Image: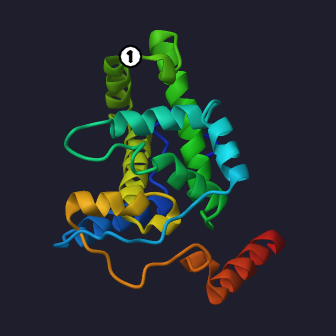
């Protein structure tokens, strides 16, 4: 992926981690067919320092562009919760800084921001965040015609769906807002912070050994 310079580079191939995320998205959509809303849930909260960091990040790129893309893909609406309401950026912060997310996945998220702004600068001489709604729509539709662009937008949509449908302990879906909208009842027990899959002793040991192996290879 290091040699890819734009969304329209024909040498781009879908990375394995993204294929796995696309499968996970299908499972999430399949599971969101419950019958009743949940009212009391464990809530993921950020510390004062984390919230301060997130607020600062959103004011600069690449986070500012990511925030703008998320809000465009899932804007404020009368028909369902928005990216802001499902805490899409808090979920993304959790994915990047707290979860054992593959580095390739994080790199693809951020490289996509550079490719997107490079394209909007080329076409309109402005960065993505400074565009009008219609201009943003056009630019996103343009890059969706490329393999890399389609993959990147799908990844953003997957993150939005995960933020909406995952347990609140992972940063999104505060108070089960996404489940309530879909009238979905989640399974129990729900994880709290400190009990998430990547924080369990066995999982943590596997991750640690894996990283040590990669460093030594």
**Residue nearest the viewer, comparing 183 with 2:** 183
Q: Position of residue 165 (x, y in %)?
A: 35, 63
Q: Residue 172: give x, y in percent of width and height.
A: 46, 57
Q: Which color scheme did the rendering employ for the protein?
A: rainbow
Left or right: 169 as drawn, with respect to 153: right
Front residue (pair 196, 14): 196
Is 205 left, or right, of 33 in this rendering? right
- Name which quarter of the figure residue 38 lies in: bottom left
Residues 82 and 209: in front is 82
Q: Which residue is mark 1?
A: 132
Q: Residue at image x 69%, y 51%?
A: 48
As drawn, the residue found furthest toward the right would be: 216
Q: Is residue 75 above or below residue 54?
A: above
| Mark 1: few/some/many CA within 10 Å (<14, 14-19, 20+) | few
Please name the residue shown 75% across and 71% down the image: 214
Q: Secondary structure at mark 1?
A: loop
Q: Quadrant of residue 100?
A: bottom right
Residue 107 percent coordinates (x, y): 62, 48
Residue 5 seen anywhere in this rendered image of the structure? no
Q: How many marks?
A: 1
Question: Which residue is at a point 59% across and 52% down the rendered structure image?
Answer: 93
The C terminus lies in which quarter of the figure? bottom right
Q: Is residue 39 visible?
A: yes
Instruction: Give the x, y percent position of residue 25.
Output: 34, 62
Instruction: Give the left or right position of residue 114, taking residue 22 as reference.
Output: right
The residue lying furthest to the left in this view is 35
At a point 46% along the width and 49% down the height, the residue shown is: 88
């Amino acid at each position: 992926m290091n040699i890819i310079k734009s969304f329209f580079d024909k040498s781009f191939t879908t990375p394995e981690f993204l294929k796995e995320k696309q499968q996970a998205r299908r499972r999430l959509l399949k599971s969101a067919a419950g019958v009743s809303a949940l009212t009391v849930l464990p809530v993921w909260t950020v510390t004062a320092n984390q919230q301060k960091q997130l607020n600062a990040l959103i004011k600069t790129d690449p986070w500012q562009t990511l925030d703008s893309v998320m809000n465009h893909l899932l804007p404020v609406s009368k028909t369902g919760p928005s990216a802001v309401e499902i805490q899409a950026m808090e979920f993304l912060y959790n994915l990047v800084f707290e979860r054992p997310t593959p580095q390739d996945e994080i790199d693809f998220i951020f490289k996509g921001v550079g490719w997107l702004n490079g394209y909007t600068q080329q076409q309109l001489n402005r960065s993505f965040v400074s565009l009008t709604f219609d201009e943003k729509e056009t630019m996103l539709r343009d890059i969706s015609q490329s393999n890399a662009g389609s993959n990147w937008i799908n990844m953003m949509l997957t993150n939005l769906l995960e933020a909406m449908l995952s347990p609140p302990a992972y940063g999104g879906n505060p108070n089960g807002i996404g489940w309530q909208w879909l009238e979905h009842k989640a399974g129990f027990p729900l994880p709290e912070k400190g009990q998430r899959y990547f924080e369990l002793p066995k999982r943590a040991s596997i991750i640690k050994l894996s990283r040590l192996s990669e460093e030594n290879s």
